[in-house]
Structure formats: C-alpha cells, structure tokens
Amino acid sequence: MPRPHEARKFDVWGVPFDGGSTLGWPGSRYAPARVRDALRWITQRIENGAIYSLESDSVHEVGDDLLRDRGDVDVIGHDILATIDACSTAVADSLREGRTPIVIGGDDSVLFPCAQGVHRALPGRVGIVHFDAHLDLLDHNRHQGRVSQSSGMRRSLELERVNADDCIQVAVRHFNFPSSAEFKRKSGLTHITAREFQALGPVAAVEQILDRVSGADHLFLSFDIDAIDPAFAPGAGAHEPGGLTSGEALEAVRLLAPHCDAFAITEVNPMTDHTVSTTATLTAYLLFHFAVSGSGATRR
C-alpha cells in the first residue's frame, strides 16, 4: 500500500449509472454532475498551487494538477456488464499512468469494477476497506441477479488476489440476508458496526482497520454514502438510521487516504438529497480531503 506522505496526483472519474439499483431508490446516475458542481466550490480556494487546511492550520503545496477530471466512463445504461468493464478499465488506466483514481458513482454495483481495476493494474494482494450500511455479499436472488448494488463485495472477493483476510467492512448496521451472514462467517470477513465505530472514535477505529488489512499490498477504499447517517446524508439510495456523522466520516477518510490506492464514493442520490445538495457537498469534501491528505503535499 502507498507509504504515508508519498507524493501523488489524482484522477476523478464519474460513473453516471444506476442500473444496479433494483432495490432502494434510483437516481445516483445524476451524482457525478452534482458532486462536480460542489467540488468547484472547494477547489476555487487553491491559490498558486496551495490550499490552506484549517484542521491542521497548515498550507498544503498541492500543485496545479492535484485533481484531473477524466470525465465519465463509457456507461451503457442497458448493459451493466459493459459498464462494469468500462469502469474497471478507467481505474486500471489511471493506476498504470501513476495516478490515483477517485470514482464518483453511480450505484454500489460500482464497487466491484473499481476493485477489479485495482486488481488488473497492481500486483500482489489487494485489500478492500468497505464503508457501507449493508454487507453487499448477496450471491444471487431473483430480484437482483448476480451483479447489482447488493453483490459488489461478494464479486470482489472472487478475484484471485482479493482475500477476506485483507478486507474489512465498516459502519454496517441493522439487518441483512442470513445467507450473507453465513458467507461472511465462512470466509472470515470481519466488520466494525457503526455503533462500534462511534464508541472507538475515528482515530482508534482507523488504527483497527489498518491493522486488519496490514497484509495487503494495495488498498481500495469503497465508501457507500449510506455509511453516514441520513440526518447528514439524506441523498442516498437507502436510508439506515444510526450511521456515522459527517465529521466522523471526514476524519476517517483523511486518516485512511495516505494508505489507499483508489477511492470510490457510491450511492449518492440527488433525487433524495436536500435542494441545497447537502449530500453532494459532503461527498465533494470527502473526495477533496482524500486527495489533499493522500497527496503527501508539503506543509508549511
């Protein structure tokens, strides 16, 4: 996995696709455009290649090429498999060019192609840190098939160099399929519930996460926005009360960023968001904090 403070630059890809949203609310196809609008509000504060962070009271020398917007992947609305391949290719292309991909979904079927893209481009063991209210371990059912917003982690664990020992799920809560519980226990996949995360606090929780995935050579951070409580992120594909606060999520992403090779934010849904784009704005801040904290930029 990347060494902390290793200088990096980032590619932003949009995946305006919600064809995997056979449960919950569709609408995440509109997220990339809305998040980009919010991101411009943040990036306009970069002056002469530098940005001032109030949290650390320091100026980060990020340069003029911290974030390169690569546009949207070649989404084919009626063809989830073709869209998955296009997303995987985009992630792999960025990594092969020496840049770190940040993907704006799209529904959480995007989890699998992002993991697949990291797997294609980088050698060694690939670990996944998966923030989500749900397990996404569904193998198949008549409502969703084998590839959907509920199967991304299951399909990712079928990749040759992705092992449950190098993965952890964070902020899960409430109820899920018994078949997913059986698979999770048999595979050895572990989780930190939202309640456990909040009891630990972001610093201790991230220490526990990194200890769990320490055997991986590369890490993919997948963040379903419903990991955050709907009071802070109403624009989601599904609402599960009792999630993380926006502050807890931002701190976790800041702490994890230096260790991760790719980042995806999924299930942001402008159709259920506040009219002032509360969730899209939070997503843009998660994205930007990941880039600044993960860039290894010089501070002064």
Image: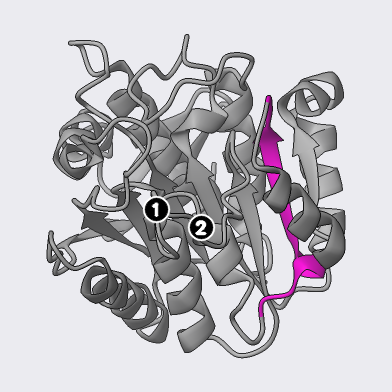
Residue 73 lies, with reference to residue 159, above or below; the image says: above
Q: Residue 213 falls in which quadrant of the image?
A: bottom right
Disc 1 marks which amino acid? Gln
Q: Is residue 291 left or right of residue 188?
A: left
Position in image of residue 47 (x %, y %): 26, 39
- Judge by depth and name the residue closer to the eye, 167 or 51: 167
Circle 2 crowding by C-alpha within 10 Å: few under 14, some 14–19, many from 20: many
Range of the magenta residues?
162-174
Is residue 56 at least partly visible in the picture? no
The coloring applied to the image is one colour
Numbered circle sitting on residue 144? 1
Kindly check if marks 2 and 1 are in contact, taking CB atoms under 8 A apart as contact: yes
Position in image of residue 182 (x %, y %): 79, 54
Q: Considering the numbered disc 1 on the image, is that residue within a helix, a strand or a loop?
A: loop
Please give the name of the residue rendered at 24% of the width and 36% of the height, measured from the top-left corner.
26
Please give the name of the residue rendered at 84% of the width and 20% of the height, measured from the top-left corner.
199
Sequence order check, earlier mark of 2 and 1: 1
- Judge by depth and name the residue closer to the eye, 132 or 245: 132
Numbered circle sitting on residue 173? none
